Image (cartoon, helix red, strand yellow):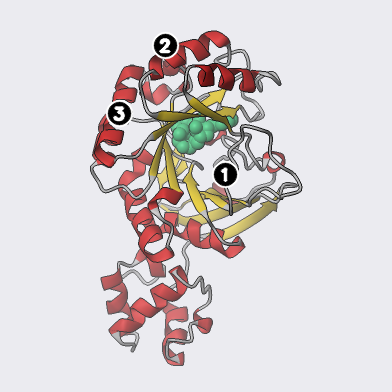
Amino acid sequence: MSDPVRSLLAHSPQELEERVVALGGRPFHARIARRELLTNGVLDYAAMTGLPGSLREALAAAVPLLSTREVTRTTARDRTVKLLLALPPRDSREATVETVYIPPHEPTSPPPEGTATPKGATLCVSSQAGCPVGCPFCASGLAGLARNLDAHEIVEQYVAGRAVGPIARSVVMGIGEPLLNFEALRAALEVVHDEMGLGARKVTVSTVGFPDRLARAARSKPRFQLAISLHTPDDDQRDELVPAMAGTPIDAVLAAGDDWFAVTGREVTYEYVLLGGVNDGTGHADRLVRRLAGRRCTVNLIPYNPTEGLPYARPESGAPEAFRARLAESGIVATVRWSRGLDSAAACGQLRLRAGGVTTN
Ligand code: SAH
Ligand code: SF4
């Protein structure tokens, strides 16, 4: 017997059929309800006109449409929308995650040269509530891991994002380390791919790149592109910047990236947070070139987004472009990704876990 408070997507299709039948419906009504929510974006049972009225009422009383609840919505000056979603309490602990809807640039305000310009909105979703990796420049890891997200809690972020507007692509670059909750993420992205119509080329998952986990992920029919957060060409510095991977040599991470390319046929993007005076100089650029030489990949340079209380600074104004040019001279394609939503703390690394579902910015 299903737990009565489980939401629609917390049920497998089979379980939902059983539930619907128990509530007096026909098995195919379960498929209709799922399609209304996932494919058509209908957020109210009452509006699911393909279902008999009595079943709509019975479902509304018995099966919550969503398990996550929007707590706040913050819109930045550049129209980036940050949603704070409360997860259902577990072991009487509450947790929240953040999902960010990033609309395309207005044609009247062209982005700086060398900046990636995605068309259509990008949704940035979280894979965990909190993060156990502990990168010292990232707000998401400050409080550690609260809990893993279930697959349907990841899917519900897409549902919530699409309620803001159409989604052209998505990045799993919110809170959490995707490879540490990979089964749930894989299942969620399957739903997002099959039932919400977001193609594998439109979804990018960013990870610190645990090699063994990455090797397994490459062999799991991944429905996404891969980005690996590298951040430095130097082993000792990476141990500091990505503490949970201390002791894993950069060569092992790059070898896992090569393996991913060999198995999936899709190139890897390496991400590199530019921390002023820490990893953004020409020496770092040159050593990064040597590390990446001969690889088919691109590099995403992300100027550090300041977070209160963290001991890092933005790179000086010319540094990101100089770093990019240095890579380009050696034939490595790099883009500088200026984050959106800075004024509402919705940019990379500024998302943080808030317990209790209460937040102010
Ligand atoms: N845990 C995964 C995905 C989430 S973080 C990962 O680390 O890859 C997504 C990206 O934002 C990562 O490349 C991360 O290094 C970067 N990031 C984290 N904090 C940042 C900050 N304060 N400024 C800019 N980028 C940041
Ligand atoms: Fe976790 Fe990624 Fe933040 Fe590191 S950068 S603490 S892995 S979310």
Quarter of the rendering occupied by the N terminus: bottom left
Report helix, strand or loop for mark 1: loop
**Position in image of residue 31 (x %, y %):** 34, 77
The answer to which quarter of the image holds residue 167 is bottom right
| Comparing labels 2 and 1, the label whose residue is closer to the camera | 2
Residue furthest to the top in view is 283
- The residue that label 2 is drawn on is 236
Q: Are marks 2 and 1 in contact (CB under 8 Å)?
A: no
- The residue that label 3 is drawn on is 258
Q: At label 3, which amino acid type do we have?
A: Asp
> What's the distance in space between the residues labelled 2 and 1, CA to CA?
32 Å
Q: At label 2, which amino acid type do we have?
A: Asp
Q: Earlier in the sequence, mark 2 or mark 1?
A: 2
Quarter of the rendering occupied by the C terminus: top right
Per the rendering, the mark at residue 354 is 1
Residue at the location (32% across, 74% down)? 16
Residue 230 shows in this picture: yes
In this picture, is 109 found above or below 26? above
